[in-house]
């Protein structure tokens, strides 16, 4: 249950232990200035001036803020035969307490608002005047605020040095904050708090002291615990839209530390966008409390459920993100491309998006004519080509430049990056199938991606996932069985042995619809003689025909988990069959007259180009579309036939599972 500072009230602080950073004006030979350690308020010393003629010393600092900013506080001590003294922060701010010279340490304060504050400490008089100044502080206010509260919660503020209670405040109805007047304190000062639930239960007593200051805002948030949120829709539409649904029904479930449902607990709900009704609800026999979200405006609503805690179940909170679309998207087959962000279609100047093979993040870039306030950072982005959705992503970057003004660049990754937003705290699986584990992870740690078609993989896994992102945990599970996953355009996750659609109807021919093709053949990885060492056994495989054709190229390999000779021989042969073929990469551009969805990454197309010696079936690694022409396809191809692909998959599985 942490408390963190969200607003820093301290604007400037100087102990005045020496003259560093200060300039002395009109300092005559009769006067002298230096640090003194024997008489000070705090720090290691104070700034000491002994003079027989007037002297001024000053420093300046810049502070953000307008009227009301800049509470100047300084300790001052003076003695001597001079008639008066004065402290003058400028411009035009008068400090309290001008008076005779003979007095002890006194703290003076002045309030005023200006962005640039200069400080002058001046001594006026005839002879034998001594002045000492120490501990100069500028803060934005004399109050300290605690936020994130529920009406009825009590907060106590203590000074750490002697555990003195500085004040008690209770959050009023309709409010979420309380404030303490700490003008009597010599801040920045070490303090701590106690925060209570509405029923008097102690929710937080800071075990550590924090350096606090006037103008600070400290936010209290119940920590992650046994409270969870589920919703029936993570995309809804604003109330005036034609699209549906317009309501997101929310269920908060509270459990005891032992995992039992906890009834009779009041759960408080809030949202950053729209309204939740009711604002609080009592958990039923199943430990569930209910509310509903609606909104008149589009954007991103972060829903918070808060349990204030009691002696049985500690305080905790849970969050869920719901996207409120402006309107339902309207795909149009007569439009080349359409770009939507949170249900709003935007006119574009230029742009591109990619579709890569699995395990590679797709990206988009779009340039629009000018900045519009309706654009939502972190909003869902959908791009349609000829009326068919081909990209679903998230707006993560907005680039605005004076040189490109008024144009604005928008970019981001595909929605699979949502897996990067959730951390698996602790999950232990004993003899569970991969699809069970993936389904449970997506259900336990909702991120906006739900289980899709999870293929039936019979292999059982025993695995512990501890403090790991979903985007790391799920690929690790797939690697253990050498299956794959993909996130679809509908934000579901599929799990399968292969996602290749095989050979498609798409065919491209030189002189007809091929604009550009480069064929780069790399012979460096070739190996036609493999010696593989297993667990106490060795297998050697070679291809005589390839040796005569290519020359002898040997390579070692290790699979020390394999102790069966037949299995090792099969693995060695599979590796040889992959290594003996040269690797090709083929950037390719062509006229694409096929309907959207005809081919995608990892599918196969037929290429005929006598100029570069290509005639056959090639696999697609990457597709890039430019928003200027829906009929232009930029592809990256490889020379893998379907049989070759399946061979590599079989080899990888074989080295993962020695039972094959």
Image (cartoon, helix red, strand yellow):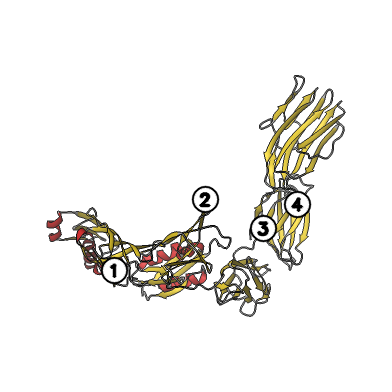
Q: Earlier in the sequence, mark 3 or mark 4?
A: 4
Residue nearest the viewer, comparing 521 with 572: 521
Determine which of the numbered discs, if any, sits on residue 604 in the image.
1
Q: Which residue matches tag 4? A: 143
Where disc 1 sits, the SS reads: strand
Which marked residue is nearer to the observer: mark 3 or mark 1? 1
Q: Nearer the viewer, mark 2 or mark 1?
A: 2
In the displayed image of the protein, which residue is found farthest to the front? 334
Q: Is residue 133 above or below residue 531?
A: above
Q: Do the residues labelled 1 and 4 touch (CB within 8 Å)?
A: no
Q: Is residue 126 left or right of 465 when viewed as pictured?
A: right
Which one is earlier in the sequence, the residue at label 2 or at label 1? 2
508 left or right of 161 in image: left
What percent of the width, then of the height, locates residue 17? 70, 33
Q: Where is residue 333 in the image (x, y as percent from the top left)?
A: 42, 73
Question: Quadrant of the rendered structure where residue 606 is?
Answer: bottom left
Q: Distance between the residues labelled 2 and 3?
A: 35 Å
Query: How much space separates mark 3 and mark 1, taking CA atoms?
Result: 55 Å
* CA–CA distance in space, label 1 to label 4: 68 Å
Quarter occupied by the N terminus = bottom right
Image mark for residue 219: 3
Please tell me whether mark 3 sits on a helix, a strand or a loop.
Answer: strand
Q: Is residue 261 above or below residue 636?
A: below
Q: How crowded is mark 4: few (under 14 residues within 10 Å), some or many (20 or more)?
A: some
378 vs 539, nearest the viewer: 378
């Amino acid at each position: 249950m942490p408390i963190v500072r969200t607003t820093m009230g301290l604007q400037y602080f100087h102990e005045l232990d020496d003259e560093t950073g200060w300039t002395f004006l009109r300092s005559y030979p009769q006067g002298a200035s230096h640090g003194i350690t024997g008489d000070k308020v705090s720090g290691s010393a104070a700034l000491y001036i002994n003079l027989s003629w007037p002297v001024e010393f000053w420093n300046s600092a810049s502070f953000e803020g307008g009227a009301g900013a800049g509470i100047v506080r300084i300790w001052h001590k003076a003695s001597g035969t001079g008639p008066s003294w004065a402290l003058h922060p400028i411009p035009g701010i008068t400090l309290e307490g001008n008076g005779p010279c003979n007095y002890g340490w006194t703290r003076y304060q002045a309030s005023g608002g200006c962005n640039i504050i200069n400080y002058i400490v001046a001594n006026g008089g005839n002879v034998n005047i001594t002045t000492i100044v120490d501990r100069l502080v500028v803060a934005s206010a004399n109050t300290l605020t605690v936020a994130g509260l529920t009406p009825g919660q009590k907060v106590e503020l203590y000074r750490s040095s002697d555990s003195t209670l500085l004040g008690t405040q209770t959050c009023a109805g309709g409010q979420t904050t309380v404030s303490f007047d700490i003008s009597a304190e010599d801040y920045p000062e070490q303090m701590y708090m106690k925060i209570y639930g509405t029923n008097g239960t102690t929710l937080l007593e800071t075990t550590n002291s924090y350096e606090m200051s006037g103008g600070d805002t400290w936010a209290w948030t119940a920590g992650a615990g046994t409270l969870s949120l589920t919703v029936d829709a993570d995309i809804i539409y604003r109330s005036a839209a034609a699209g549906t649904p317009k309501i997101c029904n929310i269920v908060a479930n509270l459990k005891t530390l032992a995992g039992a449902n906890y009834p009779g607990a009041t759960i408080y709900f809030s949202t950053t966008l729209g309204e939740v009704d009711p604002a609080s609800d009592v958990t039923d026999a199943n430990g569930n409390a209910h509310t509903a979200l609606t909104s008149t405006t589009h954007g991103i609503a972060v829903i918070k459920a808060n349990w204030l805690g009691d002696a049985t179940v500690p305080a905790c909170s849970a969050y869920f993100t719901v996207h409120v679309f402006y309107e339902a998207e309207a795909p149009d087959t007569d439009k080349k491309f359409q770009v939507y962000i949170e249900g709003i279609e935007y006119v574009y100047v230029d742009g591109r998006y990619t579709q890569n093979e699995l395990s590679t993040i797709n990206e988009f870039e779009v340039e629009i004519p000018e900045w519009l306030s309706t654009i939502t950072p972190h909003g869902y982005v959908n791009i349609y080509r000829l009326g068919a959705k081909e990209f679903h992503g998230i707006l993560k970057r907005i680039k605005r430049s004076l040189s490109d003004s008024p144009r604005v660049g928008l970019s981001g990754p595909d929605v699979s990056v949502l897996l990067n937003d959730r951390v698996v705290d602790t999950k232990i699986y004993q003899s569970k199938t991969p699809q069970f584990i993936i389904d449970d992870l997506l259900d336990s740690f909702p991120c906006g991606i739900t289980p899709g078609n999870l293929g039936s993989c019979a292999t059982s896994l025993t695995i512990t996932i501890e403090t790991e992102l979903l985007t790391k945990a799920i690929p690790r599970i797939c690697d253990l069985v050498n299956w794959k996953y993909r996130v679809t355009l509908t934000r579901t996750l599929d799990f399968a042995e292969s996602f290749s659609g095989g050979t498609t109807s798409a065919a491209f021919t030189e002189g007809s619809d091929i604009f550009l093709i480069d064929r780069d053949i790399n012979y460096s990885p070739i190996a036609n003689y493999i010696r593989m060492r297993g667990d106490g056994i060795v297998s050697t495989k070679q291809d005589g025909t390839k040796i005569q054709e290519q020359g002898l190229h040997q390579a070692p390999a290790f699979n020390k988990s394999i102790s069966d000779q037949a299995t090792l021989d099969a693995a060695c042969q599979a590796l040889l069959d992959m290594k003996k073929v040269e690797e090709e990469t083929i950037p390719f551009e062509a006229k694409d007259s096929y309907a959207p969805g005809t081919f995608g990454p990892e599918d196969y197309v037929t290429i005929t180009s006598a100029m570069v010696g290509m005639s056959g079936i090639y696999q697609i690694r990457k597709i890039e579309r430019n928003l200027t022409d829906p009929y232009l396809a930029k592809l990256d191809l490889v020379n893998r036939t379907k049989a070759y692909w399946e061979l590599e998959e079989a080899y990888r599985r074989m080295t993962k599972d020695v039972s094959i």
